[in-house]
Amino acid sequence: MPVLKKLFVSSFALAGVAALLLLGGVVFNGTVSAFSGQSGGDAGRANANRLYIEGRHVFRYDTFGDEAVWGGVLGLQKAIEGSKLGGVGPGISPKQALAVGLKVDANAIPPQIAEAIKHGQVNLDDPAVTVQLLKLNAVVGVRGFFNGNQLKSVGITCAVCHSTVDDSFAPGIGNRLDGWPNQDLNVGAIVASAPNLAPLEQSLHVDEATLKHVLLSWGPGKFDPLLELDGKAFQPDGRSAATRIPSAFGKAGQNLDDWEGGWGSVPYWNAFVANLDMHGQGTFHDPRLDNSAKYPHAAAAGFGHTHPYVGEGVLPVPGQDTGLPDQVTEKLALLQAYQIDLPAPKPPAGSFDPAAAARGAKIFNGVGTCSSCHVGSLGTAPGYTAVAPSQICIDSFQADRGPDGTYVIPPLQALFTHSKRGFYHDGRFKTLLDVVNHYDSCFKLGLSAQQKSHLVEAPKSRAPTSRPRSSRHGLASRCWPGWP
């Protein structure tokens, strides 16, 4: 351990030097200098650069003050430390953190420590190493707040769910991939490890055993952002009501975001999640959440009219403004700019059959009628991108949890980044062929086995960009919203 401590101490100085070099590089290449003294198109480009850089920082590192809940109220940092470091329980080692899907940014680990890890000189079964990784800001989407070397609190950022790594250093450790859904993240298991779950139990009117049962039912790659609104933890058939974590890239030109229609676009969801799911300290307005029949927990807690206070989205909203600063609203434009600028990644070589995909594209735009809703390179429908459950031959459970009872038509982009947990909002279809078979039956397409095999390859290569053929049944009658 003394060797490890020495390595970490020396790493802090190196990290500081690296930060200065990075800043110098930014200034040298003209990015910062472009922000001033510009006009017309140059000013617009400079502003876009600024929004992108600042938005990336918010996306990766800003907790919106949610450490007041995750650390101050729920005490998650105590579970991480373990009793030997002043917390509770056995603690959470790096191996355990990786096992629940947390990722580590290899670029935040100084070279000496990286070499020590490679040579087995760092004990990855020791919670103290997890604490040191937090101090290096190396755990993607999780920030530690320290008093000296003592971990005092932890918060989460957008990146915890909507980023992963390329595993270039080791499984779960590598370069950041912003916007990619973390398909390994077990949000429920992480929340269930918090020492003080009483506020959540009170909010949902359940006991600890029931709450943990619900949280542990989610599994990897899924989360239920609506649980604290309506308390609906399970579908009628007993399956978890949690939905797949969506991607956060390729949003330019798209209207609705997430799975249920009627909520809103990217900035709406950023405000919703930052305030009500991440429990940041901000302002959120949506009077639809006052509907006590549909959203009993949200209505009782006043989630549709929140303002900054400690406990946002967990504890009942106090009757008067506390005067705390809003740590969310002024960052929404930055977040939106970054997410819109994040392109959908290209499918890797060998992930699809090009010849079959070309043949599948003709089916996609022809007899398959897929392009009636997945239009061009947008990959979804322009305008109001939602359809009724009956139009796509599925149940309405998740749609009914949204404001207007519809399902969003997600774009067919970069399927290889978010198909590990199946397809559709809840992953009910395990393969693309299962999806094709469902729609072949629903729409009575009469596709042959060969046509189906070709059609499966088309979305793997990205949604076709050729002009779609019109469907005689209209835009909303034949939609494939479950593909991504």
Image (cartoon, grey):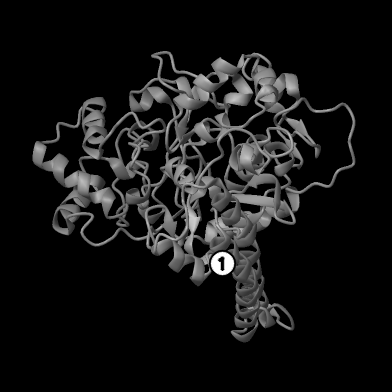
In this view, the residue in front, 78 or 233, is 78
In this view, the residue in front, 276 or 2, is 2
At mark 1, the secondary structure is: helix
The 10 Å Cα crowd at callout 1, few under 14, some 14 to 19, many 20 or more, is: some
In this view, the residue in front, 456 or 383, is 456
Q: Which residue is mark 1?
A: 7
Q: Position of residue 378 (x, y in %)?
A: 41, 53
Q: Is residue 405 visible?
A: no
The kind of residue on which mark 1 rests is Leu
Vertical comparison of 199 with 113: above or below? above
Q: Residue at x 27, y 40 (%)?
A: 369
Q: Residue at x 77, y 34 (%)?
A: 306
Left or right: 442 in relation to 324: left
In this view, the residue in front, 284 or 44, is 284
Left or right: 332 in relation to 264: right
Q: Residue at x 73, y 33 (%)?
A: 73
